[in-house]
Amino acid sequence: MKKIIVFVCGLLLLTACSNHESAASVSEESSQPTIKTTSALQDLPEYPIIRKNVDLEIFELKVVADNPYKRVILIENNTSGEKEYKSIYIKKTNRLKLIQFNEGLLYNGIVN
């Protein structure tokens, strides 16, 4: 009887551990952002304001987060590869914040 109880407990322990590992691997795969390039972003409502404040011939836009609530775009220098700007667009309120990492907030307003 004791052998059966020990066997069942061991089996449950192994089963619980194996489920935990597969869940961790799934979360690692889903945490990688989908990156869109500049050409696919021209239809976005915040694009004209970004274009007005940032020289897009020198910089490249990369979407790092796009969910039903907000979109985050990192803007990096084509030559050095350094990230110099960040755009945060709140979809529900149509608010856009454009931040330059060295200078601070460049734009904070409602997009029409």
Image (cartoon, helix red, strand yellow):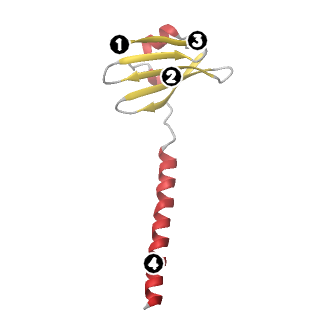
For label 3, count other residues whose C-alpha is less than 10 Å away and answer few (under 14), some (14-19) or many (20+).
few
Which residue extends farthest bottom?
A: 1
Nearer the N terminus, badge 1 or badge 3? 3
Q: Gap in Å between the C-alphas at discs 1 and 3?
A: 21 Å
Nearer the N terminus, badge 4 or badge 1? 4
Nearer the N terminus, badge 2 or badge 3? 2
At x 48%, y 7%, the residue is 52
At x 46%, y 26%, the residue is 72
**10 or 67, which lies in front?**
10
| Side of 56 where 96 appears, left or right | left
Q: Residue 34: x and y, percent?
A: 48, 36
Secondary structure beneath dot 2 equals helix
The amino acid type found where label 3 is placed reads: Glu
At x 47%, y 83%, the residue is 7
The amino acid type found where label 4 is placed reads: Cys
Query: Would you name the residue on which mark 2 appears?
Result: 38
Residue 66 seen in the figure: yes
Query: Would you name the residue on which mark 1 appears?
Result: 110
Q: Gap in Å between the C-alphas at discs 2 and 3?
A: 23 Å
Residue 46 seen in the figure: no
The amino acid type found where label 2 is placed reads: Thr
Mark nearest the camera among 4 and 1 is 4
**104 or 69, which lies in front?**
104
For label 1, count other residues whose C-alpha is less than 10 Å away and answer few (under 14), some (14-19) or many (20+).
few
Mark nearest the camera among 2 and 3 is 3
Query: Would you name the residue on which mark 4 appears?
Result: 9
Place residue 84 in its image quadrant: top right
Q: In this view, does 13 lie above or below 93?
A: below
Mark nearest the camera among 1 and 3 is 3
